Image: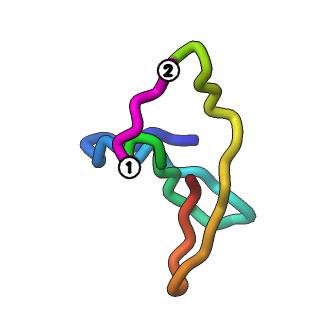
Amino acid sequence: MNQMPRSHANLKGVTNYRGTSIPVIDLRAAIKITANEEEYEAVNVIITEYNRSVQAF
């Protein structure tokens, strides 16, 4: 995953999936849920498509 300079705080970066660049959004930050660092492991990514737009959470 590549970090994007001067991007929104919820955008964690962009990743390449099957030749397509997909933005990776931190859903926890987007819906304003505080993370307990002891329980939080950022290992799963869900890729969605809605209205011809693909993004990962």
Asked whether, in this view, residue 5 is left or right of residue 48, the answer is left
Name the residue tied to disc 1: 31
At mark 2, the secondary structure is loop
Pick the residue in front: 41 or 15. 41
Residue 26 place in picture, x, y as percent = 47, 44
Asked whether, in this view, residue 36 is left or right of residue 39, the answer is left
Asked whether, in this view, residue 6 is left or right of residue 26, the answer is left
Query: Residue at coordinates 64% horizontally, 26% vertically from top-left?
Result: 41
Asked whether, in this view, residue 4 is left or right of residue 26, the answer is left
Query: Residue at coordinates 38% horizontally, 49% vertically from top-left?
Result: 31
Q: How dense is the environment of label 2, judged by Cα within 10 Å: few (below 14), some, or many (20 and up)?
A: few
Pick the residue in front: 55 or 34. 34
Q: How dense is the environment of label 1, judged by Cα within 10 Å: few (below 14), some, or many (20 and up)?
A: few
Span highlighted in magenta in the image: 30-36
Name the residue tied to disc 2: 36
Is 35 in the magenta?
A: yes
Query: Residue at coordinates 64% horizontally, 55% vertically from top-left?
Result: 16
Is 33 in the magenta?
A: yes
State the separation of the CA atoms marked 1 and 2. 15 Å
Instruction: Name the residue type under label 1.
Output: Ile
Instruction: Name the residue type under label 2.
Output: Asn
Residue 30 place in picture, x, y as percent = 37, 49
Q: Residue furthest toward the bottom?
A: 51
